[in-house]
Amino acid sequence: MGRITASKKQLKPDPIYNSLLASKFINCLMWDGKKNAAESVFYGALEIIKTKHQDKSPIEVFHSAIENVKPNIEVRSKRVGGASYQVPMPVQKNRQQSLAIRWILNAVRDKKGQPAHEKLANELINAFNKEGTAIVKRENVHKMAEANKAFAHFAW
């Protein structure tokens, strides 16, 4: 008898902008399996971006914001002898994307007092303009890597 192997589910692009990144972002935004709520927050944010940035399409602003937040280098703990060192290492492409999405969503969730789609729109516009909480997080990671570059020879 042949074995049945579970096939990995393929991510489908989102229905409006046909973007795989938008689909992944919506899935990361989703809580408790409520995809409709996550989609309404995401598309509501893109509508706000459309009204504020009429010169660019909202999906371009979204993609640029994610690109601006992606870290190039990060520090990882490496145990050598009896000591742990923070070793700067380059970040793989898929991890860059995951970190960027996570940092933007954490920045949105930490803010209070506004509807979620407005907070998301503001954070995406700030990231597009290379400012805001997610960009500050990226800069802190890069500063940490720069400060610990003396330990780069421990990279594995």
Image: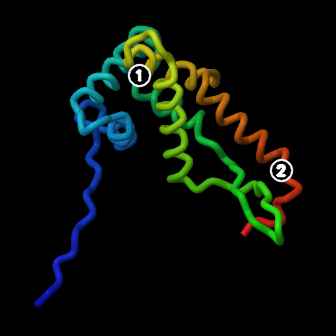
Give, as a three-letter code, the residue at label 1: Ser
Left/right placement of residue 127 relative to residue 60 reads right
Task: Give percent across and percent down for residue 31.
Answer: 31, 35
Extreme residue toward the front, this view: 82
Extreme residue toward the right, this view: 150
Is the residue marked by circle 1 packed among few (<14), some (14-19), or many (20+) residues within 10 Å? Answer: some
In which quarter of the view is residue 29 placed? top left
Left/right placement of residue 136 relative to residue 46 reads right
In which quarter of the view is residue 76 placed? bottom right
Task: Give percent across and percent down for residue 40.
Answer: 27, 23
**Residue depth check, mark 1 versus mark 2: number of the one nearer the observer:** 2
Q: Which residue is mark 1?
A: 57
Residue in the picture at 55% in, 37% down: 67
Left/right placement of residue 78 relative to residue 123 reads right
Q: Secondary structure at mark 1?
A: loop
Q: Who comes first in sequence, dot 1 or dot 2? A: 1
In which quarter of the view is residue 71 placed? top right
Q: Secondary structure at mark 2?
A: loop
- The label on residue 148 is 2
Residue in the picture at 77% in, 43% down: 144
Q: Are marks 1 and 2 in contact (CB under 8 Å)?
A: no
The image shows residue 13, relative to residue 8, as above or below, that is above
